[in-house]
Image: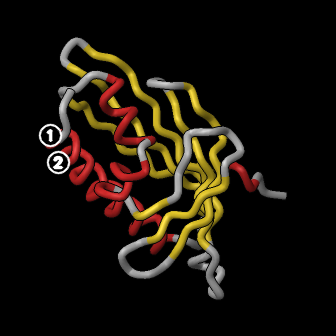
């Protein structure tokens, strides 16, 4: 018998931003800001809130807020239904904010990729890099 949990894959992206945790927290939790760097949404920072992310490609992700620890940690489920099991995904995205001397280190971890989801895993690695670049641009355009 194999340990299924040991086979689950994770995408992790860490980046330091020259902004205080409060500013990053706003960008992670305000729907209008989330829409600018991630996707259109009906997000609320309330544990148990079900929300939807709608991608530019027209696809949707069904999500549920799991953790809200202001300016420290935010986690939500990230579920993508698809007829092809290789593309269907049930995962958890966790953002961890750590203050630094020059701003905030943001760690994003998406856990839940099965071994047969190499394409989805690669797409997520690429996608999260692009999302972080867009987040950086949003942060630069917003007041402290």
Q: Mark 2 points at which residue?
A: 137
Q: Which residue is drawn at 35% across and 24% down?
A: 22
Name the spot of residue 104 as percent of width and height, x first. 29, 24
Distance CA(mark 1)–CA(mark 2)? 5 Å
Q: Can residue 121 be seen?
A: yes
- Determine whether, in the image, residue 13 is placed left or right of residue 121: left
Q: What element carries label 2?
A: helix
* Depicted 95 relative to depicted 105: above or below: below
The x, y position of residue 36, in whole percent, is 29, 57
Q: Quadrant of residue 113?
A: bottom right
Q: Position of residue 142 (x, y in %)?
A: 19, 39
Is residue 27 shown left or right of residue 141?
A: right
Question: To which residue does mark 1 refer?
Answer: 140
At 36% across and 52% down in the image, what residue appears? 32
| Residue 53 placement, left or right of 18 | right
In percent of the image, x 66 and y 55: which residue is there? Answer: 50
């Amino acid at each position: 018998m194999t340990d299924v949990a040991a086979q689950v894959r994770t995408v992790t992206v860490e980046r330091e931003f020259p902004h205080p945790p409060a500013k990053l927290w706003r960008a992670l939790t305000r729907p209008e800001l989330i829409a600018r760097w991630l996707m259109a949404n009906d997000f609320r920072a309330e544990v148990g809130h079900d929300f939807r992310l709608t991608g530019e490609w027209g696809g949707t992700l069904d999500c549920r807020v799991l953790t809200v620890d202001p300016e420290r940690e935010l986690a939500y489920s990230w579920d993508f239904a698809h007829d092809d099991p290789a593309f269907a995904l049930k995962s958890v995205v966790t953002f961890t904010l750590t203050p630094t001397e020059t701003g905030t280190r943001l760690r994003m971890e998406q856990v839940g990729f099965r071994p047969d989801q190499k394409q989805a895993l690669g797409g997520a690695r690429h996608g999260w890099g692009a999302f972080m670049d867009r987040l950086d641009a949003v942060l630069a355009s917003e007041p402290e």
